[in-house]
Amino acid sequence: MTQRPASDRRALLARKGLAALPLVTLLGCAGLVVTALLGFEEPDGRMLLVSGLLAAAAPVGLALHLLFSRDMSRADKRAWLAGLLSSSHVGLMGDYFDPEVRARATLRLRAQRRDRAGLAAQPLGATDASGAGEGQRPTGK
């Protein structure tokens, strides 16, 4: 039986740990609901604290992984940060925890970032390929 090198084991553990964070968050949310339902007039403070910490596991884990990960370039990290701060952050958050899906989402975020940069570089009132200025409909000439 061959043993894996320590770096492979660490990478596997990190990947599995990152994949488990959404489940830990769900457990924390369930704990908050149970505490709210069974706490009646005064919920148990310790249970609220534990459930709150568990509920924050996925967002905090994502932020820490994004900060300390060596798997992504600085530009990719910026693209992820911009995406997570946008209105589509909920869908992106789910994509982050699976390495294959994260790779596809990273490509999509790069393309969106390039598109936004291309639009930002276009001067105000510039015409597009149809000859229509900004805010104008193209004419059928």
Image: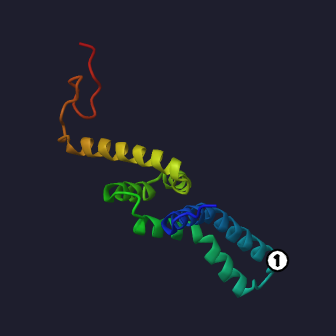
Q: Name the image quarter holding residue 129.
A: top left
Q: Is residue 34 left or right of residue 62?
A: right
| Residue 63 screen position, x and y as percent | 46, 67
Quadrant location of the C terminus?
Answer: top left
What is the count of numbered marks? 1
Q: Which residue corresponds to mark 1?
A: 38
Q: Badge 1, how many Cα within 10 Å: few under 14, some, many 20+?
A: few
Q: Is residue 124 left or right of residue 20?
A: left
Quadrant location of the N terminus?
Answer: bottom right
Who is closer to the viewer here, 126 or 13?
A: 13
| Residue 69 screen position, x and y as percent | 42, 65
Residue in the picture at 47% in, 44% down:
104
Above or below, 80 relative to 108: below
Under circle 1, the secondary element is helix
Q: Name the image quarter holding residue 126.
A: top left
Residue in the picture at 78% in, 83% down:
41
| Residue 113 screen position, x and y as percent | 33, 47
Residue type, mark 1 in image: Leu
